[in-house]
Image: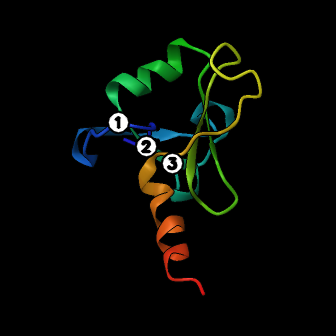
Amino acid sequence: CTFPGCDAPPGWCDAHHIVEWAQQGKTDVNNMMLSCSAHHHLLDRSEWETVMLTDGRPAWVPPASVDPARRPILHARFVAQEVIDTLFNE
């Protein structure tokens, strides 16, 4: 699952359309992300949203009650490579 902090493995996840299929969202890798059942239902029953960043990483946008600025949040697995890349900079 791509929800920040969730450790559900891919086999337990659903493919979620970022732009909903009913709103002409395409069923392709550029518009899909994995979400476990609990987080998939969270999207349907709350003000949480998802976006695909321009670099292709899926992010979750919290409701204003959680973050008034509604800044996208990434799962740690999508941030780890950035950290690794900076470890050996001179």
Q: Nearer the viewer, residue 76 or 22?
A: 76
Q: Which mark is residue 32?
A: 3
Instruction: Tell me where residue 35 sits by quadrant.
Output: top left
At label 3, the amino acid type is Met
Q: Is 9 on the left or on the right of 69, as rendered?
A: left
Question: In the figure, 41 relative to 72: above or below?
Answer: above
Q: Position of residue 63 (x, y in %)?
A: 65, 19
The residue carrying mark 2 is: 2
Q: Nearer the viewer, residue 42 or 77?
A: 77
What residue is at 58 percent from the left and 40 percent from the top? 73
The residue carrying mark 1 is: 6
Q: Is 32 on the left or on the right of 90, as rendered?
A: left
Q: Position of residue 79 (x, y in %)?
A: 51, 57
At label 2, the amino acid type is Thr
**Secondary element at tag 3:** strand
Circle 1/circle 2 CB separation < 8 Å:
yes
